[in-house]
Image (spheres, helix red, strand yellow):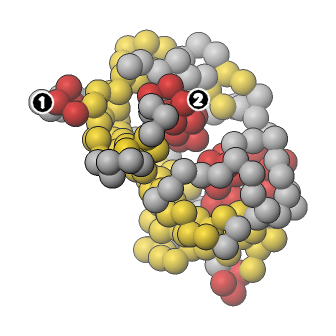
Amino acid sequence: MKTELKFKGSRNYLHSTDFYTWLSTAVCDENQIVTKLIFKQLIHRQCEVLLGQGAVGVEENIVGAVQFLDKNTRESINGVMVETATPVDESYPFDEDALVKDAEIVASQQQITASCHNDCTTVELVVALTKKLHNTLFSLNKGKWLVGQLNFSDELPIVYESVSIKTTRMMQNKFSINDVIIDGKRFGTVQFIVGE
């Protein structure tokens, strides 16, 4: 399965949320959910996703990994993302700041909450909130905060009242683990890393 993704906004790399949405809609069958998505580097070209035995022995150009869970059998399927030579030749408008402009940060709890419904996917809001929290509380002199890993125990809801991100671990201001809480329920974590 090959991606046909576009750059998000002014970025020159493919965004974690677009991979998540594509995997959830184009790759998963109706009983599957994406439970883990790992990024090893910034991805500038289209990717091929290899699952199960198809991923064995592929070492070169691996830029990420994915795990699916079958909701009925509770079995996991693992795969890798391999960057291809196919360029990304389109982008689409995306105003990340607008998504989180009304979000409330409680610095003492290292938490940010948005209580509004947005014109975006839930995973886009999760990542945008995590980024705003990091840029506010853990600003960087060089590099930028990027998604290293998404871990979800359940399907992210489409309709919700509030989304909160709480930083539970910060290591050397370069790596963080953040809880994703939607309507009071913990759905998993977002790991952020510093990259160029």
Answer above or below: position of 37 versus 154. Answer: above
Gap between marks 2 and 1 measured at Cα: 29 Å
Residue 4 showing in the rendered view: yes
Circle 2 residue: 12
Q: Going 76% across and 73% down the picture, which residue do you hit?
A: 105
Q: Name above or below for residue 134 compared with residue 20.
A: below
**Which residue, given by chain and number where applicable, does mark 1 sit on?**
57
Q: Position of residue 95 (x, y in %)?
A: 79, 40
* Residue nearer the viewer, 145 or 118: 118
Q: Specify the quadrant of the image occupied by residue 40.
A: top left
Mark 2: amino acid: Asn
- What kind of element bears circle 2? loop
Q: Give the residue type at disc 1.
A: Gly
Q: Is residue 107 left or right of residue 20?
A: right
Other residues around mark 2 within 10 Å, as few (<14) / some (14–19) / many (≥20): some
Where residue 97 sits: x, y (%)? 80, 49
Can you say whether 130 is above or below 31 in the image? Answer: below
Left or right for 169, reference 106 = left
Number of on-image labels: 2
Depth check: 130 or 184 in front? 184
* Quarter the N terminus occupies: top left
**Residue 28 quadrant:** top left
Q: Is residue 8 left or right of residue 43?
A: right
